[in-house]
Amino acid sequence: MSVQSFSYSSFLRGPSQVLPSLTDADVILERRDEENLILTRAERFEATATGLRFAARSLSILARRHRDLAEEALAEELPWLTWLPAEDRVTCVRELLADLMAGADTGLLVPFARNLASWRSTAEAWSDPQLARDLQGPFDGDGPVIDRPGGDLA
């Protein structure tokens, strides 16, 4: 599937110049100060959603019946999983699969994407042995005393 990009303002000025592109491609409407928008035909959107639900459920069934195989498949797709401790790796796989299934069912994949980014950041912290040790504590005291903003209002 190809993708074509147009400026959002050109779409607003002349949608009839942009909409024919949807026959063969999805359209990205690029906006300057906001997140870009995507236009797609309903049939392609439904096919993507159906495929995602099918893949998420299939992967979830695989994970329940053959956890090691599911972890291996995810580790191949997400090589940074190897930086996580074994216990966290299992939790990560379980959480990501649950979020993926929920997202596939509801169409809300942002929680999955956020959790994926969070786990990746956690794995990156574990990849640095000194940082991992430092983050596990112990921590000395409560830290320095910081004045309240705006001066002493007490």
Image: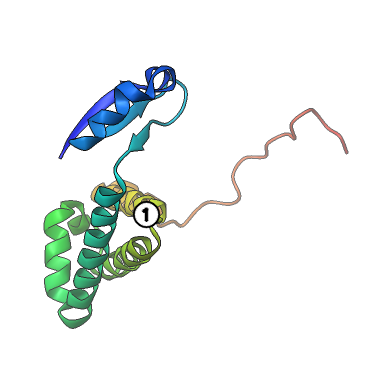
Q: How is the image coloured?
A: rainbow
Quadrant of the rendered image containing residue 24? top left
* Residue 102 drawn at (x, y percent): 37, 66
Residue furthest to the bottom:
65
Q: Residue at x 21, y 77 (%)?
A: 61
- Label total for image: 1
Residue furthest to the right:
154
Visible residue check, residue 129: no
Residue located beneath label 1 in the image = 109
Q: Which quadrant is the N terminus positioned in?
A: top left
Visible residue check, residue 115: yes
Give amino acid for label 1. Answer: Leu
Q: Viewed as shown, does residue 135 lie left or right of 83?
A: right
Dot 1: element = loop
**Is 64 drawn above or below residue 2 in the view shown?**
below
Q: Residue at x 43, y 17 (%)?
A: 13
**37 or 45: nearer the eye?**
45
**Is 9 drawn above or below residue 50 in the view shown?**
above
**Is 143 drawn above or below residue 30 in the view shown?**
below
* Residue 94 drawn at (x, y percent): 30, 70
Q: Which quadrant is the C terminus positioned in?
A: top right
**126 or 56: nearer the eye?**
56
Quadrant of the rendered image containing residue 18? top left
Dot 1: few (<14), some (14–19), or many (≥20) neighbours within 10 Å? some
Q: Residue at x 25, y 60 (%)?
A: 52
**147 or 48: nearer the eye?**
48
**Is 12 drawn above or below residue 122 in the view shown?**
above
Q: Residue at x 68, y 36 (%)?
A: 146
Quadrant of the rendered image containing residue 2? top left
* Residue 107 drawn at (x, y percent): 38, 57
**106 or 87: nearer the eye?**
106
